[in-house]
Image (cartoon, grey):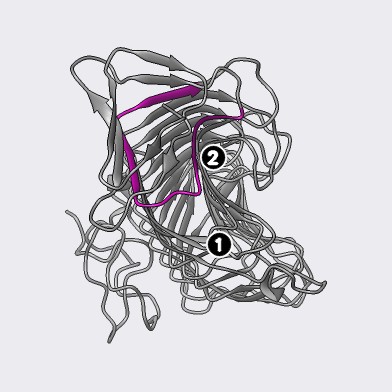
């Protein structure tokens, strides 16, 4: 099969119930209106591609207009080294267009802990080469299950064409930043990954939505988070659920990382992560115009919102609801830096119940000035203009997303400050007003009786 050169419109179908051992690496490319389609036929279980310890089980190299569906992919033999399930790679290719990975079951990809352009992942898109700047356009990674992977679950796009000052490049720019565009990662299930869950890199206006991550940073000795962008502009993460992050390296659900502008985390549900809720992380590059709004964090621990060592040009964390239940502790805001950082923290509800603690850790002369927040049983709050310590009357905190609506008579109703360009809706889909005070927290609807 690998010896064939596939033509536009070709279908490559594997019989269900069969198992193919080794790397599947087809050649050729599709064309607009005539993509190459790779999938399954017949009845029964998905056909299996078993990489058997090769670097890649499925390798799509220097191709475009290609769609892959309905396969099972594994690569468990001879653990160690770089191992991938599905690897899509461009090398000195220019712009490749139209890639679909859908309804794949990718599991037991036992690679090493390498974090690089060609590291170990369940799904990896990468760009290499020294001669011709290359990038992906129109990528859809949807409805896949990725389970049992070292290091990362879904990573796109690692690129050698990544250099720009925003990411901390200090030397001569020899491979200027070349954006990967029209990327959508949606409806995927990612579990039991050694490191990161879903990562967006070197991209413009990528969308990550309706994904479920449960169990990440389980085996890596490095720093990993559930979902995050790096060296990317305009990335939106919405309607995702992230849980089961282990360790405090990083181990939190979300991260706005270095070299990013206009990252948005909205309408996400984070819970039971050992590293916490969200990280705003810059070292030597730039983080600007980040927005974290209308999310719910339940029983995340260690930290709520933390800043890394570098400066933050601008970030706004508003209208989130954070609940820290019995036996849990959290530093709700952890200013882990003395570098200039401009972070607003407004209209959030933070409730601590039972044993354990919740507190703010702000540096002297802090750059974070909380306003209009509800802090219940939270220590270290020196100033919170327009805010309150009154019980916000949450419906049933601790039971999941439905529990964070407000009961009738809540003092958090219409008690927030107006936020321009607020996204237009709350966590539950209710309209958010632009012309008068919103509720505090992630719920904007009427009080629930």
Q: Tell me the chief SS of the magenta region.
A: strand
Look at the numbered disc 1 and give the secondary structure of its residue: loop
- Quarter assignment of residue 37: top left
Q: Is residue 227 left or right of residue 14?
A: right
| Sequence-earlier tag: 1 or 2 | 1
Residue under pointer 1: 134
Question: Please, is residue 45 above or below residue 251 in the view?
Answer: above
Q: Which residues are magenta?
A: 55-74
Tell me if label 1 and label 2 are in contact, CB under 8 Å.
Answer: no
Look at the numbered disc 2 and give the secondary structure of its residue: loop
Question: Please, is residue 172 above or below residue 105 in the view?
Answer: below
Q: Residue at x 51, y 26 (%)?
A: 23
Q: Where is residue 134? Give x, y as percent.
A: 55, 62
Residue under pointer 2: 273
Q: Where is residue 404? Give x, y as percent.
A: 33, 51
Q: Residue at x 26, y 78 (%)?
A: 433
Q: For label 2, count other residues whose C-alpha is less than 10 Å away and answer few (under 14), some (14-19) or many (20+).
A: many
- In the rendered image, which quarter contains the N terminus? top left
Residue 112 counted in the magenta span: no
Outermost residue to the bottom: 435
Q: Nearer the viewer, residue 319 or 4?
A: 4
Residue 59 counted in the magenta span: yes
Q: Is residue 335 left or right of residue 100?
A: right
Q: Is residue 102 visible?
A: no
Q: Where is residue 236? Give x, y as percent.
A: 42, 63
Q: Nearer the viewer, residue 448 or 39?
A: 39
Q: Residue at x 43, y 67 (%)?
A: 205
């Amino acid at each position: 099969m690998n010896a064939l050169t596939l033509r536009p419109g070709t279908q490559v179908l594997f019989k269900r119930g069969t198992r193919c051992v080794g790397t599947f690496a087809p050649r050729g490319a599709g064309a607009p209106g005539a993509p190459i389609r790779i999938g399954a036929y017949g009845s029964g279980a998905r056909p299996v591609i078993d990489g058997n310890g090769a670097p890649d089980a499925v390798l799509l190299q220097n191709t475009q207009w290609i769609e892959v569906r309905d396969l099972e992919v594994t690569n468990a033999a001879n653990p160690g080294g770089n191992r991938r399930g599905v690897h899509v790679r461009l090398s000195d290719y220019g712009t490749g267009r139209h890639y679909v990975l859908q309804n794949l079951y990718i599991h037991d990809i036992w690679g090493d802990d390498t974090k690089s352009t060609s590291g170990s992942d369940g799904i990896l898109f990468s760009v290499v080469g020294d001669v011709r700047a290359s990038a992906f356009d129109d990528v859809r990674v949807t409805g896949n299950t990725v389970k049992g992977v070292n290091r990362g679950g879904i990573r796109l796009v690692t690129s050698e064409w990544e250099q720009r000052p925003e990411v901390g490049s200090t030397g001569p720019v020899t491979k200027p930043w070349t954006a990967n565009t029209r990327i959508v990662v949606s409806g995927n299930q990612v579990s039991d990954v050694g490191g990161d869950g879903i990562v967006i890199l070197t991209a413009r206006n990528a969308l990550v939505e309706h994904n479920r991550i449960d169990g990440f940073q389980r085996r890596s000795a490095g720093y990993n988070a559930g979902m995050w962008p790096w060296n990317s502009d305009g990335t939106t993460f919405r309607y995702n659920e992230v849980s089961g992050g282990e360790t405090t390296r990083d181990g939190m659900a979300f991260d706005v990382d270095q070299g990013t502008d206009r990252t948005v985390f909205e309408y996400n549900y984070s819970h039971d992560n050992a590293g916490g809720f969200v990280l705003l992380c810059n070292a030597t590059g730039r983080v600007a115009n980040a927005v974290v709004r209308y999310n719910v964090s339940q029983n995340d621990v260690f930290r709520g919102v933390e800043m890394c060592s570098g400066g933050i040009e601008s970030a706004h964390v508003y209208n989130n609801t954070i609940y820290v239940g019995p036996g849990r502790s959290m530093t709700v805001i952890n200013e882990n830096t003395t570098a200039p950082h401009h972070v607003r923290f407004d209209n959030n509800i933070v409730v601590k119940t039972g044993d354990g603690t919740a507190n703010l850790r702000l540096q002297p002369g802090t750059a974070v000035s909380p306003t209009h927040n509800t802090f219940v049983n939270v220590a270290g709050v020196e100033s919170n203009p327009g805010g309150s310590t009154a019980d916000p009357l949450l419906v049933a905190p601790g039971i999941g997303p439905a529990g964070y609506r407000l009961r009738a008579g809540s003092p958090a109703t219409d008690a927030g400050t107006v936020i321009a360009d607020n996204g237009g809706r709350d966590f539950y889909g209710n309209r958010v007003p632009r012309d008068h005070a919103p509720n505090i927290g992630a719920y904007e609807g009427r009080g629930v009786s």
